[in-house]
Amino acid sequence: MVFHFPHYQTGTPQSAIRLGDYKLIKYYEGNKTALFDLSNDVRERNNLAVQMPEKAAELEALLDEYLVSVNADLPVANPDYDPAKPSGFPGRARRGADPNVIVPFNTTFDPARLYFPE
């Protein structure tokens, strides 16, 4: 099973593959991977990528091969990116929230931070 999110939405671009009991998440920003044994870690708290580099490499190779086979769009660096420019979503700030509506959108959430804290 493969999941592929090559864009920024509530986090950074990432792809994942599940094979048997193992799940690998590939984070394109920072070129990091997280590997989990779901038979022992269903909450994905223990990143095994360092302890099991062969398994991580195997799953990453399968993931990359699959993405190429389906001609998946892959994230590329934005040549116009300027870190000095303000970030965020100016359209939402300009419009504001609708009255009495809770918008479950968190612009600071990034799943990669769960496994790779700064």
Image (cartoon, grey):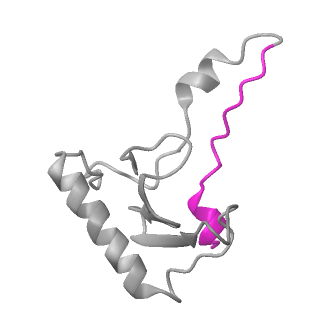
For the residue pair 13 and 1, the one nearer the viewer reads as 1
Residue drawn at (38%, 52%), measured in percent from left and top? 82
For the residue pair 84 and 92, the one nearer the viewer reads as 92
Instruction: Where is residue 92? Give x, y as percent.
Output: 60, 24
Residue drawn at (65%, 48%), measured in percent from left and top? 108
Q: Farthest residue to the top: give it.
A: 99
Magenta segment, prevailing SS (helix, strand or loop) = loop
Q: Farthest residue to the right: give it.
A: 100
Instruction: Where is residue 51? Give x, y as percent.
Output: 53, 89
The magenta span reads 101-118
Q: How many marks?
A: 0
- Magenta stretch: includes residue 97: no
43 relative position to 91: left or right: right
In the figure, residue 45 lies in which quadrant? bottom right
11 relative position to 96: left or right: left
**Position above or below: 64 against 52:** above
For the residue pair 96 and 70, the one nearer the viewer reads as 70
Residue drawn at (19%, 45%), measured in percent from left and top? 70
**Position above or below: 21 against 104:** below
Placement of the C terminus among the 4 image quadrants: bottom right
In the figure, residue 100 lies in which quadrant? top right
For the residue pair 112 and 18, the one nearer the viewer reads as 18
- Magenta stretch: includes residue 110: yes
Residue drawn at (24%, 55%), measured in percent from left and top? 66
Instruction: Where is residue 68? Give x, y as percent.
Output: 17, 54
